[in-house]
Amino acid sequence: MAKTLVLAEKPSVGKELARVLGCRRGGEGYMEGDRYVVTWALGHLVTLADPDVYDKKLEKWDMEDLPMLPQHMKLVVIRETTKQYKIVQGLMKRGDISDLVIATDAGREGELVARWIMIKAGWKKPTRRLWISSQTDKAIKEGFANLRPASEYDNLFRSAQARSEADWLVGLNVTRALTCKFNAQLSAGRVQTPTLALIVDRENEIRRFVPKEFYGAAITLDGFRARYKDAKGVARSFNREEMEKIVRECEGRDAVITQVRRMRRQTPPPAAYDLTELQRDANKKYAYSAKETLNLMQSLYERHKVLTYPRTDSRYISDDVVPTLPDRIRAVMMPPYKELAQRVMRNRPLQTKYLVNNAKVTDHHAIIPTEEQAYLYDLSGPEQNIYDLVVRRFLAVLMPPAEYEEVELTLSVGPYSFHAKGKIIREQGWKAAYDRNFSFDEESDEEDEDQRLPDLQQGQRMKIRSAKVTTGKTSPPARYTEATLLTAMEHPVSQVEDKNLRQILKETSGLGTPATRADIIEKLFSAFYIERHGKELMPTSKGIQLVGLAPTDLRSAELTARWEDRLARIAKGLERDDKFVDEMRTYATNLVNAVKASDATYTHDNQTRKPCPECGKMLLLVHGKRGDMLVCPDRECGFRKSVKQVTNARCPNCHKKLELWGEGDKQTFACACGYREKLTDFQKRRKADGAGKSEVRKYMAQQQHKQDEGNTAMADALAKWLANKNK
């Protein structure tokens, strides 16, 4: 009997599809049933070949070999996932497999994952496409009942492949050119470099900023305060003498209320979450990095199936999702959301302009709860936090606007005009979904104060109780946090002057996509271009120099705007992909020539006097995301050594995170409060305290550094301890 092969993007998704499709027989890397065989990738199994595949001499980085411009880009199987690729390839060649369903993530990159595997494996049989936004049983069944011909998505694949080939041509050539020219580990790219430029430009603004003192005048009356404003409505002045004169003339006098304005206002609910907005709020409220939030969302989507597809740039749903809203509300009708959910269900209709907008839905709709009920005790603490954000936003957008009465007073004291503002909440509306501590990022006038005002009438005279000069200083722009950097990446209009290109960036996703921004920020950390100071992101000397050395085109989001415009045309069938890629070959050549012709220099200002044990070059001291490291400046050497790590172990005295210093038997925990403890003593104490296996494994996982951040001495030591304990 002929069977249909289903190709998912990840094992977790593949196994869910297999369960729904009745595939109960497990094989290595796939599940099989009577009608379907479900297999999966591990993200990308196939990618564009490295330069040395085209010519062995390109294994060595040499300026003379640049630019690298292969006319026909080759695909290779990713070495680490070769085993799974061979399983998928074998299934495609099985005689009883009659057709294929592409069930990778529904988007440009998901299409690329599947098509490259199919091309490399030589797939020629009929193919259809599954396009769904959630992993619930209902969504999967409906998706398989409405499969589309894969040919409808051919242009989407061509767009994705053109983007990938263009990034290869530009990114690899410029990275090699910069590294060879300046003898330093430097990398540049269409998205990474303008993102770094945002941080560097902000830092330069802060360094150039000179604070300036300003003054104002304020009077206190019975129960409230009013500020002076000039004829243009400006409260600040850089003339102190002028403000002192106003204060002197107001002291001991009466103020007359010349105008009382009462206005009923509404604040509409915020739109539902897309990934970037969710990452912003998670960073502000819980200090989660963009990468952490994406990983938590993936788990809630794939494993728990309680939230819809996370990698979306839309904040609305389409009409066809509206009939499912009652089931989604019932799914969250549990503490602590039960009362809110019941209120929403009572206040029909559920369709609202704040949530439903077909024109603003792209490949996927906004992130909302699925029809599956969540069991909160099955979720980790961070997963519960992300789920809570999404559920409250989902319920809030279905609730009525918040209503309040705004009262504005104008008072005159002789020739001077003073102003006071107050607000009275009439209906909480959607704000009932949140506690008082939640920030809604509403715009506020820093010159005015919202205060409770007494019931006053026009013409009323009031005694001035006191008058004083107020002072303040102008502030520099704030450094980026991950939350504000995500916003800047989504709307990088400050880097773009052309109005048409600005509009393109508004209509597309800006720098990167909701799915890739987290990885871009992580790469800036791992390349030591930026450091984190508390929540603030600061560029390193290396990052600042790179922005100056990189070709001008790569420092701005304009390049992305031009690319996205053309990639969108390719996806719509309005432009040929090969024409775009050919132009990128010429463009990459021009960029390499610009680097070659540069007379700039690069300085390692973090160089130490310690020689690299592998090649003898002087090591660099860098501040990684989790601690300090010594790094060899030679890219081909690649030696790295951890100096200190910030661990998740807590100081028993002040409860701050401990740092781990040293190597081998001399490793020691240290705290700023003065506490010290050898690693060996720590292990003994943990063993005496009876730490369980799961606790130790969790701790080790938290300490596990990525390869690009050095060795994990702490995790290695704990691994040995656990192994000895289990003997």
Image (tube, rainbow, N blue to C red):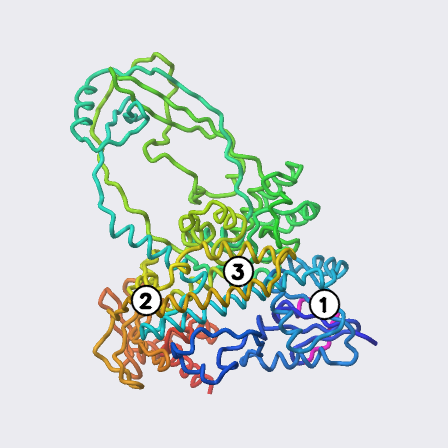
Quarter of the image with the N terminus in it = bottom right
Q: Residue at x 37, y 76 (%)?
A: 710
Q: What residue type is labelled 1?
A: Val
Q: Which amino acid does label 3 sit on?
A: Ala
- The residue that label 1 is drawn on is 101
Q: Is there any visible trace of residue 147 in the rendered image?
A: yes
- 16 in magenta: yes
**Residue at the extreme top:** 459
- Quarter of the view holding residue 663: bottom left
**Residue at the extreme bottom:** 727
Which residues are drawn in magenta? Answer: 15-27
Secondary structure, mark 2, is: loop
Front-lying residue, 578 or 16: 578
- Quarter of the view holding residue 712: bottom left
Q: Residue at x 25, y 27 (%)?
A: 218
- The residue that label 3 is drawn on is 515
Sequence order check: which comes first, mark 3 or mark 1? 1
Sequence order check: which comes first, mark 2 or mark 1? 1
Q: Residues within 10 Å of mark 3 (few under 14, many from 20)?
A: some
Cβ atoms at labels 2 and 3 below 8 Å apart: no
Q: Which percent across, then down, holds residue 650?
A: 34, 66
Q: Which percent across, then down, holds residue 210?
A: 22, 46
Distance in Å between CA atoms under marks 2 and 1: 51 Å
Q: Which residue is drawn at 37% across and 27% down?
A: 421
